[in-house]
Amino acid sequence: MADTAENIEQVLNSLLPELRPGEPPVVAAMRYATLAGGKRLRPFLVVSSARVFGVTGPGVLRTAAALEMVHCYSLIHDDLPAMDNDDLRRGRPTTHKAFDEATAILAGNALLTLALEILGNAVTHPESDVRISLVTGLARAAGVAGMIGGQAMDMAVHETPVMDLDGLIRLQQLKTGALFAFAGEAGAILGKAADDARRALISYAYDMGVAFQIADDLLDVRGEAKDIGKTPGKDAASGKVTFVSLLGEGEAEVRAHEFSDRAIRHLDAFGPEADALRAVARFAVERRK
């Protein structure tokens, strides 16, 4: 994962616009938000799922980088005062604090559109049908049927905090899980995999995403800012519905491992080439930051 993160950092740096003196700060904000480190877990899933089908190379890294740009865009917007209103992200001031709200909004929008441009470029893949599948897959995962839909549900729950466990799982499958699902699907698209293999990777990624989110909720309760890179205890302070608030810490931890184990079972049809995906499902619930 560390090697992939380093490679992705280099690719992101090369794909982002260059800073030009005297121009508005939107490019600086894009680079600030994107080149801020982090686990690069979604790119790692793209690289690992592609490797299951023997696919490597620049096109895989470009796809992974495009997905990471969408993730970084979502973090910029999540942190805005109208959304989660946070001051700290990845151990640094959030983008709207480092710049201003208007610049942060524009930087997020620019990252989303750049990501789609990258996937539509023939450099990413020479075959147009593969590029179209990547573009439509990422657009769907980021839109109202995915991440934005989940974010909208989250905001509605914040206003009227009544939700059962099934509803919260559905919310997180959209808000968090949809980008994870695309990460698994992208490897299958690049590998021109059969439908059953593609479905298995999508199912794996959805369950892994829920496990990851439960672990995030636990870290919000147990973690420290220096480790998790954001303000701890914020969910409880804002009255947000989380897996911990619904289940308690002990039961939430049990459920996280159940989803992680189920994610791994979706990979039964694959051999050792999927071991990295199995390992990351365990990492999702065992991490401390």
Image (cartoon, rainbow, N blue to C red):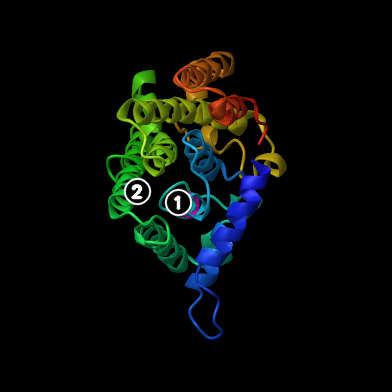
Left or right relative to 150: residue 282: right
Q: Secondary structure at mark 1?
A: helix
Magenta stretch: includes residue 206? no
Residue drawn where x is 43% and y is 61% of the image: 111
- Is 175 displayed left or right of 258 in the figure? left
Q: Quadrant of the N terminus?
A: top right
Image label count = 2
Left or right of 246? Residue 150 is left
Which amino acid type is marked by label 1? Thr
Estimate the x, y position of residue 171 in percent, counting from the top left: 36, 31
Mark closer to the chain start, 1 or 2: 1
Q: Residues within 10 Å of mark 1 (few under 14, many from 20)?
A: many
Foreground residue among 47 and 216: 47
Rendered location of residue 15, percent (x, y): 50, 65
Q: Which residue corresponds to mark 2?
A: 134
User: Which of the two residues, 109 or 50, is positioned nearer the viewer here?
Assistant: 50
The percent coordinates of residue 83 (x first, y second) are 42, 49
Residue tagged by mark 1?
63
Q: Is residue 227 above or below residue 105?
A: above
Give x and y (percent) for residue 56: 52, 46
Q: CA distance from mark 1 to mark 2?
A: 8 Å
User: Could you tell me if the residues under marks 1 and 2 are in contact, i.e. CB atoms within 8 Å?
Assistant: yes
Query: In terms of secondary structure, what is the magenta stretch mainly?
Result: helix
Which element carries disc 2, helix, strand or loop? helix
Q: Quadrant of residue 183 in the image?
A: top left
Quick check: can you spot residue 124? yes
Q: Amino acid at mark 2?
A: Leu
Highlighted magenta segment, given as a residue range: 62-66
**Label 2 crowd bin: few (<14), some (14–19), many (20+), radius 10 Å:** many
- Residue 88's place in the image compared with 188, above or below, is below
Residue 41: numbered disc = none
